[in-house]
Image: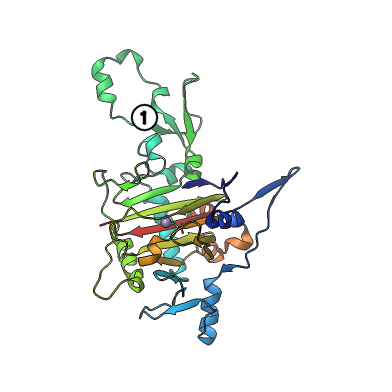
Amino acid sequence: MYGEAQISGNSDRTAFRRAEKKYKLFKTSLGRRKSVKPVDLSEVFDFRAILESYNRDGGTPDGIVRHRCGFDLPVFGFEDRPGFYFIPGALSVEEQCHWIKESLLNFPQPPNRTNHTAIYGPIHELFIEAQKKRVLIEADSLDVDVDSTDFDSINANANAPKWQFCEEGCEVPKAGSCRSISACSLLRKLRWSTLGLQFDWSKRNYDVSLPHNKFPETLHQLAKRMAVPAMSEKEEFRPEAAIVNYFGSGDMLGGHLDDMEADWSKPIVSMSLGCKAIFLLGGNSKEDFPVAMFLRSGDIVLMAGQARECFHGVPRIFTDDENAEISPLVSQLSRQDDLCFLDYIRTSRININIRQVF
Ligand code: OGA
Ligand code: MN
């Protein structure tokens, strides 16, 4: 499901795949010049433009509804897609910056798992180590006293971290067995982290036996507030887990269903941060033709009820200055201390996807 844009061969079988192919990033190289194939965006719904025109004259385009749900911000949806809610510009630029920093500094911290955990074990302070240009090195290849490898010390070392951060250019034996990777490259390859109850991607289920932190309180409050349009008055949304997705240029999230939670009537609250993306919302089958829409930094989407059973995905993010549409973030993150976050988010998108599991 997660990976580089790789749609090839006889992959145009379904309507969903054809739409992914239409919008995905195609890079062609003509000699030494790399260029991006232009995409026809004329059929992509733009809820910011819909909001602006709604604010002018109170109307919505054909097929678009404004949900009357007593929420303090306008909430839109599609006439023929019950359970789908779009809240354009739901988060202020200050809130966006707060969640970008949390997603980079705190959310990938152990015991939360990331796509790197299975390979390297728990990695602490990845973002900070990347700023320090440090390198993760397999502990076996570091200078250790080989004579002391009796059974006791082997057992004592069984729980020692296998990988450790070192200064760039630190002393490692020249042996061919030395494995290392820079923190910068690990940060670039960070694709997901999980909050609260930990999701096991290999088994595609929640593993309650995995150590985990309590779901972050401020994110809990935000998700509860934002879920209101998709909840009946008597119900309460109880966020228990979140998946944080990190997208770089050329990354996509293939069409999928989130079907691992027990109660599908409860919404998934999904917030977008950073570069603009295209989101595809399909039907119950990949044969159903999906609608495409832009997701910008600060937008929130809710998927509840019937929309929970719909295929969806992100075929494309835009990282070029003209299309990324992150100028409010650029101004907000221009202080010296914040430039490291700006440097990351200029070419990235973060999505925080909050769920009630039970
Ligand atoms: C997901 C998901 C959508 C997005 O993580 O399950 O659908 O906007 N993410 O990134
Ligand atoms: Mn999903």
Is residue 342 something one can see in this rendering? no
Q: Quadrant of residue 144?
A: top left
Q: Quadrant of the C terminus?
A: bottom left
Is residue 324 something one can see in this rendering? yes
Q: Tell me residue 68's x, y (percent).
A: 39, 81
**Are there few (<14), some (14-19), or many (20+) residues within 10 Å of tag 1?**
some
Q: Tell me residue 233's x, y (percent).
A: 27, 76
Q: How is the image coloured?
A: rainbow
Which amino acid type corresponds to the residue marked 1 in the rendered image? Lys
Horizontal side, residue 56 vs residue 38: left or right: left
Horizontal side, residue 333 vs residue 196: left or right: right
Q: Tell me residue 186's x, y (percent).
A: 47, 40
Q: In the picture shown, does residue 26 fall above or below 299?
A: above
Q: In the picture shown, does residue 164 fall above or below 291?
A: above
Query: Which residue is nearer to you in this view: 216 or 74?
Result: 74
Horizontal side, residue 75 vs residue 343: left or right: left
Q: Which residue is mark 1?
A: 162
Q: Residue at x 29, y 74 (%)?
A: 232
The answer to whether the beta carbon of the residue marked 1 is less than 8 Å from any atom of ligand 1 is no
- Give the number of marks: 1
Q: Residue at x 26, y 20 (%)?
A: 153
Query: Which residue is nearer to you in this view: 338 or 215?
Result: 215
Q: In the picture shown, does residue 70 fall above or below 146?
A: below
Q: In the picture shown, does residue 315 fall above or below 229?
A: above
Query: Quarter containing ligand 2?
Result: bottom left
